[in-house]
Image: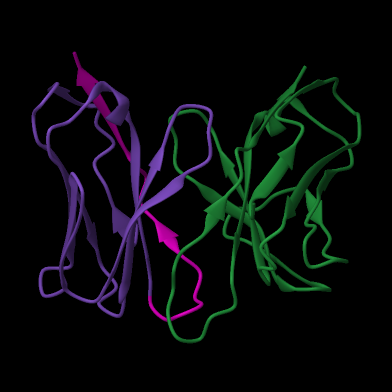
Amino acid sequence: EADIYQTPRYLVIGTGKKITLECSQTMGHDKMYWYQQDPGMELHLIHYSYGVNSTEKGDLSSESTVSRIRTEHFPLTLESARPSHTSQYLCASSPQNYQTNYGYTFGSGTRLTVV
Amino acid sequence: QKEVEQDPGPLSVPEGAIVSLNCTYSNSAFQYFMWYRQYSRKGPELLMYTYSSGNKEDGRFTAQVDKSSKYISLFIRDSQPSDSATYLCAMSQWAGNKLTFGGGTRVLVKP
């Protein structure tokens, strides 16, 4: 079944640790996105990619970095976690389609708590 | 001013009532309009998709787009407690373009 997977679902980690949030999709989508969302708040785009070796920063400035070495994989890394990074991180993907726009498929998210 | 405005709610209704949600937007070039439902601690899931103006119905859900007023609506008939969630509108200008999301409206359907 085609889907988008995020791991871990929950992560509690100490300040200063390096973390990588994983996102993989099996749909062959070219485009992938990372959003940050605090509880009850709106989505903020922090990174996106339109294909392998293509990454761009989103509308919200973030200290995280991303890479896109394989089409299906779009990990997000924080070199040194801080309490201000505590949030939910959502990964999404969409196909490259020049005829229409069917929107995004989202993963279930990673809830990150930095203590 | 945000490009897409959505009342954050919460909107509380009794079970069986009609839920009425809406978004206003400022970019008249938007052509693709979507509604997402997001349960607590989950990712958003696509509910409805419409292109340009008009209505679209899918079961208990009806989406309306009024491009002349830059206003879109989502109606949920015969609401159920399981409809309690946050509903986000999203839109884009071109095919393959990034989506612009509203802030979401929290809906509570009380049994």
Q: Quadrant of the N terminus of chain B?
A: bottom left
Viewer can see residue B94? yes
Residue B27 coordinates in the image, percent (x, y): 29, 73
Which residue is drawn at the image coordinates 66% and 50% (left, top)? A4
Residue A35: image x %, image y %?
A: 60, 49
**Residue A95 coordinates in the image, percent (x, y):** 59, 72
Q: The C terminus of chain B is located in which quarter?
A: top left
Query: In front: B93, or B34?
Result: B34
Relative to residue A115, is residue A43 drawn left or right? Answer: left
The verdict on residue B100 being magenta is yes
| As drawn, A71 above or below B10 | below
Residue lying at the far front of the rendered structure: A1
Query: Image check: A104 left or right of B28?
Result: right
> Which region shows up in magenta?
B93-111
Chain (green): A
Q: Residue furthest top?
A: B111
Identified at 23% across, 76% down, the residue is B52
**Depth order, front residue of B25/B11:** B11
